[in-house]
Image (cartoon, rainbow, N blue to C red):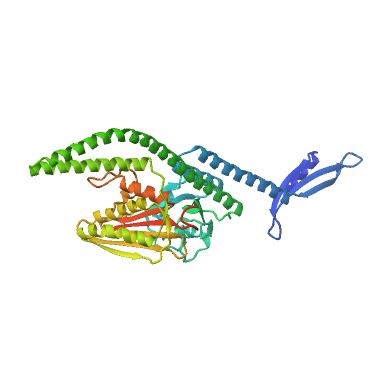
């Protein structure tokens, strides 16, 4: 019928100009341009059909490649424009996932983030997730990781994109959570790391119900999209730091202004109380006066800590022998620990390197951690103190562990915030000052805790040639 239709067109004087696509005998996909003309003889009647065939396969492939690359560029630019304007990380992640799913026509897009060294579902999914994946979503969000061999854990470990053909699986479980992929008809899975400060901060996962292959260019663009998400995290951290510094600067100006006004009357109260107590014979009155004097000291310390946090003094650095420094620290603290029935187990490496420290500030910081550990064990307990030079790391690691009451998970992120305290008489500045001191020395601090099991504080100080500062 096709041949008859073409012939009728030619007889009617219509030029034939069509494209025909097909698979040849070798299984190759071909695109041909077909042009047919009917040539008339001297009597004016058509007698010869002239045909011109042009192989357009390579040209069409080039056009498709250009169109695909333009689409990828548009995809990337759309995400960049959105993240550059946004200060909402979750919204930007969702936008990026939606854009990728729209371009690739994939069924599922989902985000994990690394929180306290664990990959946690952010519960951010592509818009319009099909209801047939509802159980998959619930499993991905709530099932614990039971193996470190599958995805997304392997992507976290390798820090590079990983593409899996799920259709070819037999008895293997490709995920770190035992979820029956085949039960959902998913054929392809891809995992992309989110990089932040040269470390994996999260993993994006996508699944397709189609067996269509994903090319390297698409994977490359996806990787760069989620590199941009990591860059956004960096920008937001810097933005939040600026906001915090601005608040601290304002608080510093306010604190400096009122410090003088508060200290003068406090000094007068303390001086008068001491003077009266010298001439007072009533024991009860003397006790009350001593209580006033003690509380004046507490008020002065709060002012000093507040000024120290909001307007920190420059470090007074000197080369410090860590072994001598730590031994002297424990000579000062052991009487208090003995009185509180606290047993100290020390593991301090011999011949620790000398480092540049502001001894007074570091001593105050460590004393704060030790005191908090002691306070967490009102009936007595054990504090383990470790100080080692890691063989393959250029750092000093100090670990303080206790078996006290622990810190609720909801409070772990707040313990270094100024004015946050769970103690009845706490100012909430001790941990903030200690953290500030550690960071001022180029160090890092991390805390792990479990209620009724104890707390572990890990501090790392870098060691650099000629000292621990550039």
- Work out whether residue 284 or residue 453 is closer to the camera in this orientation and state it: 284
Residue 276 visible at all = yes
**Location of residue 377 with respect to 103 vertically, above or below:** below
Viewer-closest of 152 and 126: 152
- 124 and 264: which is toward the camera: 264
- Taking the image as drawn, is residue 127 in sight? no
Residue 29 lies, in percent from the top left, at 69, 54
At 34% across and 51% down in the image, what residue appears?
365
Q: Measuring from the top left, give residue 288's x and y in whole percent.
A: 13, 41
321 vs 32, left or right, is left
Q: Is residue 3 left or right of residue 203?
A: right
Q: Is residue 451 left or right of residue 120?
A: left
Can you tell which quarter of the image residue 10 is in? top right
Q: Quadrant of residue 391?
A: bottom left
Q: Is residue 196 left or right of residue 346?
A: right
Residue under the point 55% across and 41% down: 80
Query: Which residue of the protein is positioned furthest toward the left in this rendering?
Result: 282
Give how far across and how far down residue 430 sits, in percent. 31, 47
- Residue 283 lies, in percent from the top left, at 8, 44
């Amino acid at each position: 019928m096709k041949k008859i239709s073409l012939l009728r067109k030619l007889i009617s004087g219509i030029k034939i100009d069509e494209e025909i696509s097909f698979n040849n005998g070798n299984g190759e996909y071909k695109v041909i341009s077909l042009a047919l003309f009917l040539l008339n003889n001297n009597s004016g009647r058509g007698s010869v059909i002239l045909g011109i065939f042009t192989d357009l396969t390579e040209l069409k492939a080039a056009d498709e490649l250009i169109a695909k690359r333009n689409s990828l560029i548009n995809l990337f630019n759309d995400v960049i424009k959105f993240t550059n304007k946004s200060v909402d990380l979750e919204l930007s992640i969702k936008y990026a996932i939606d854009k990728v799913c729209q371009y690739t026509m994939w069924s599922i897009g989902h985000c994990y983030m690394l929180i306290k060294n664990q990959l946690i579902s952010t519960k951010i999914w592509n818009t319009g997730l099909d209801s047939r994946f509802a159980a998959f979503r619930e499993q991905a969000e709530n099932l614990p990781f039971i193996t470190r061999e599958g995805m997304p854990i392997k992507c976290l470990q390798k820090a590079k994109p990983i593409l899996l053909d799920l259709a070819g699986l037999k008895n293997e479980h490709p995920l770190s959570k035992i979820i029956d992929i085949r039960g959902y008809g998913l054929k392809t899975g891809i995992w992309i790391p989110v990089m932040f400060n040269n470390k994996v901060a999260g993993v994006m996962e996508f699944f397709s119900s189609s067996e269509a292959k994903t090319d390297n260019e698409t994977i490359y663009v996806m990787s760069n999209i989620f590199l941009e998400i990591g860059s956004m995290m960096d920008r937001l951290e810097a933005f939040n730091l600026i906001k915090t510094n601005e608040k601290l600067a304002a608080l510093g100006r306010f604190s400096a202004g009122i410090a003088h006004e508060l200290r003068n009357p406090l000094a007068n109260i303390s001086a008068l109380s001491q003077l009266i107590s010298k001439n007072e014979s009533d024991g009860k009155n003397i006790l009350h006066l001593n209580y006033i004097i003690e509380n004046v000291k507490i008020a002065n310390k709060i002012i000093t800590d507040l000024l120290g946090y909001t307007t920190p003094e420059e470090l007074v650095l000197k080369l410090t022998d860590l072994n001598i420094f730590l031994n002297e620290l424990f000579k000062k603290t052991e009487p208090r620990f003995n009185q509180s029935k606290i047993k100290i187990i020390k593991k301090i490496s011999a011949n620790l390197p000398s480092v540049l420290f502001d001894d007074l500030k570091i001593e105050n910081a460590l004393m704060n951690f030790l005191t908090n550990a002691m306070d967490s064990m009102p009936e007595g307990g054990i504090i383990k103190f470790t100080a080692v030079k890691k063989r393959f790391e250029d750092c000093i690691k100090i670990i303080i562990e206790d078996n006290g009451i622990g810190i609720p998970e909801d409070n772990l992120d707040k313990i270094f915030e100024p004015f946050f305290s769970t103690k009845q008489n706490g100012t909430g500045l001790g941990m903030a000052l200690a953290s500030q001191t550690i960071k001022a020395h180029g160090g890092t601090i991390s805390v792990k805790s479990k209620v009724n099991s104890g707390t572990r504080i890990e501090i790392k100080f870098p060691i650099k040639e000629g000292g621990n500062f550039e």
